[in-house]
Amino acid sequence: MDDLLAVGGSLTFILGVAGLFFLKDAKGVEWYRSYAGFFLCWALIGKGLANLFRAPGYSTDYWRILAYMGSFSDMVFTAFMLIFVLVFPTPLMRTRRQFFLCIWAVLILEAVFFSLAFVEGTAGKWFRGISYYTINGFIWTFVYFKFRYTQPDKRTEKTESIADAAILMCMFYFGHIWFRWVGFWTQSDYFYFMSISSVDGGANFMWSQSLAASVIFAISMVTSELYLTSQGRTRNVAYILYAYIALGFINHLILRDTSVTTVAGGGQAGQLGGDATDFMVVWNALTAQTHFTLVRPMICLYILFKFDLVNLQSRNDKTTKLVAIILIVVMTSALLELLQSVLPISELVSASLLAVVIAFGIGWEEKSFANLTSNPNEFPVDTHPELYPQLDIDLADHAKRLNIGFSMMVGFLLLVSFVLHMIKY
Amino acid sequence: MFLQFYKDMVEDGNRNILNGFVVFFVVSLLFHGYIYNVVKADDIAKRREDPLFQVTFEEQLAVESTEIIVGDGEQQTLSLDFSNDDFRSSNMLAMVAITVDYEETSGEVGDSCDVVNVNIPPNGFKADWTKEQNILAGNADDCSQISLLVYVYPDYDGVEYLENDLLSSEIETMWSESSHGEGTLSIQLEVDATQPLGSGIVPTANDENERLQIEWTVTWFDVNIEQIGTA
């Protein structure tokens, strides 16, 4: 059992479900805000399920169900991420017709990919490396440059926060690849040998290309942020970006002579090559795997709450606060446990040290919640009305039907996994 | 729609920056394509094109035994815990074979073999309990050997095989789940002593217990993965 993946999967799943719960009575909320929250929550449910199914490993009697359901849940995740990027932080759609057309197009595309999973040979494999990272990353980076370099007379805190959101979404989606950015330029094996399971050469190229694109977006944004810092326009999110890039340098020093075979994320996908040392395993757990499992839901929690994508402002009930605080506390506890497990001191000493840290931080979870929900970031509708058209689409009119439909879709995939297991496909 | 989005995004102040980003993006992708398909093509082809792995298993046997005296009509439980075994650190537990031997030891004239029942309850120990080949119960009334077998690691049969659907690291993971074999394996032993001729008439002619020799053989394995070509 991969505990880190299981904890991360649970958190991601709970965050998604809680978000849908908050959104269930989101009437009259701007369509790009409520639908962004809705799609992101479903993406989180998909990723949470994928991580939960992969966490037990494949040495069980029912490994086929776990393997298939892990892959199918990832399809749910990528589909909703593809819809999400069309809405947040800046919607690409300009009309109601375009909006529904985009949703149907993505769902049909995913249905085709799902069918291709059962086609033998290259035709059935090529799509597995399709560049979701490239598509999403390109749009987000484009939005980042648009709003970070918007004309001075239009530049406000709102436009800056949209650029921040674009950086954070890139970080959420493929931040674990950024730890290997040096390898892309130095032609290192640990970057070019990264793969998604058993795909053929063509699909591997597409996959590798999407990893390269992830690095290109990071370098573009970090270069820009360095320039802006030199101009006295530093944003807090830039420091996180710098930290990832700096860790990428150290990562290169550690992995430069290895040939890590699979992707840098969590669980089965996080397995290192045969020449990995114990230190590399710990390092990977503290960087890429921690990002993949714990930091991802943290970033989403921030985005969902700070941009009020889940309609918190109109809900002021205790349940909302309780769920949010539980999520914050569990994430932090899991992170501390992870640190404790790798600190080179006895558990008793490290537990005492952590207890001291926690004692000083009493009440921090309340403060974190207050910081997240007070003064939510606004969309720059006043300065860029052309980018935020007011459409006659209300999530409240469709949420129930969409939730039932998407739940049936996940249930159907589970059933297919079970059937594939029974026929030993 | 995308064209409209592009037009909306581009304004006088940021046109050069957005175009610069697109140029950098395209050039960097070309760099990646060149490295992947030209510079590292041979290495990647060797490593990536459906590698074919031969998966073999190296087995180690650990044999231990003990002796237990079980009273007539009584049941005793022998508990086995393999968590501190020397093999545990680098091997996986494949199966546990148990044999129970006994002979009539009362020394009484006309005392035939006792009835011995051996049973392994499927709990408290992580094993492949649902496997049909498990032998979890046995008995004897003629002093013959009783053999039981518990398969621990799911799907393990010790036979080498070829694999081309998984990566080396995935195969390694599949055969490295050390939680199998955790817990305590309980062996319940029960004796129903047959009484010698004259019991009840001759006061000393009684069979009150039986001495059982229990031997268990634990099979440990370590997986070896070797790439032998491409599929």
Image: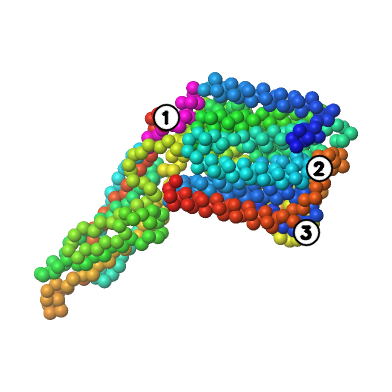
Farthest residue to the top: give it. B39
Q: Is residue B53 magenta-colored?
A: yes
Tell us which disc is closer to us: 3 or 2.
2
Return the x and y of residue A91 as percentages of the image width and height: 76, 41
**SS class, disc 3:** loop
Q: CA distance from mark 1 to mark 2?
A: 53 Å
Q: Earlier in the sequence, mark 3 or mark 2?
A: 3
Return the x and y of residue B199 as percentages of the image width and height: 14, 76
The amino acid beneath tag 1 is Thr
Residue A180: quarter of image: top right
- Of residues A236 and A178, the one drawn nearer to the viewer in this rendering: A178
Return the mark for residue A388. Answer: 2
Identify which residue is drawn at 52% across, 53% down. A415
Mark 3 Cα shell of 10 Å, populated few (<14), some (14-19), many (≥20): few
Q: Is residue A143 visible?
A: no
Are marks 3 and 1 in one subunit?
no
Question: Left or right: where does residue A306 sit relative to residue B172?
Answer: right
